[in-house]
């Protein structure tokens, strides 16, 4: 890092977009592999789906730079169905996938009427549903398609 020269704001914006595209690319690879593989165990399906959603949502979190303190990607123009899925994934990422908020789980405590090794049973009234891999893949592909156009525009404007 001795010879590192910070990027200009314009270069940082491009760099941020490329990093976001890399997140979407990883989500895309995970989902394509998941969908194309026969007989994946439910545990691995759940883990892969969660990671794909985290990679998707990661691109929409705040990134800090030198030239500009905050970069935040805006979603491309999406269909109503994709927009709803997009919002759901961001909420899941913030409340369930990357954090462990209690409210979305709507927990209940059940006390045993007799003596038991467990002091009480905990149950969930709401188990947040994960996005179906094929629906998420469609959203990721639409996003990548739109952002590649934006990347080209930003690239054309970079100083040479």
Image (spheres, rainbow, N blue to C red):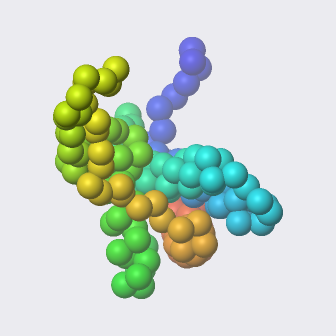
Identify which residue is drawn at 41% across, 82% down.
81
Residue 3, above or below 144: above
Of residues 23 and 129, which is closer to you in this image?
A: 129
Of residues 18 and 83, which is closer to you in this image?
A: 83
Q: What x and y, as percent, mark residue 13?
A: 44, 52
Quadrant for residue 75, please give it. Answer: bottom left
Q: Is residue 13 visible to the viewer in this orientation of the structure? A: no
Identify which residue is drawn at 60% across, 72% down.
134
Of residues 14 and 135, which is closer to you in this image?
A: 135
Q: What x and y, as percent, mark residue 6?
A: 47, 32
Q: What x and y, as percent, mark residue 45?
A: 63, 54
Q: Is residue 89 visible to the viewer in this orientation of the structure? A: yes
Identify which residue is drawn at 40% across, 41% down.
98
Left or right relative to 101: residue 145: right
Q: What x and y, as percent, mark residue 133?
A: 59, 66
Residue lying at the far front of the rendered structure: 114
Which quarter of the rendered picture does the N terminus lie within?
top right
Residue 66, above or below 103: above
Left or right relative to 20: residue 129: left
């Amino acid at each position: 890092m001795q010879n590192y020269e910070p990027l200009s704001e314009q270069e940082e914006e491009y760099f941020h977009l490329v990093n976001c595209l890399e997140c979407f690319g990883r989500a895309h690879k995970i989902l394509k592999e998941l969908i194309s593989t026969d007989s994946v165990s439910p545990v691995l399906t759940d883990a892969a789906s969660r990671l794909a959603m985290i990679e998707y949502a990661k691109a929409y979190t705040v990134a800090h730079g030198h030239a500009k303190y905050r970069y935040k990607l805006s979603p491309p123009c999406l269909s109503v169905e994709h927009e709803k899925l997009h919002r759901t994934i961001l909420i899941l990422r913030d409340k369930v996938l990357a954090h462990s908020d209690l409210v979305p789980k709507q927990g209940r405590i059940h006390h045993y009427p007799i003596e038991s090794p467990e002091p009480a049973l905990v149950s969930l009234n709401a188990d947040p549903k994960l996005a179906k891999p094929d629906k998420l893949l469609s959203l990721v592909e639409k996003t990548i398609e739109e952002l590649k156009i934006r990347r080209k525009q930003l690239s054309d404007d970079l100083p040479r």
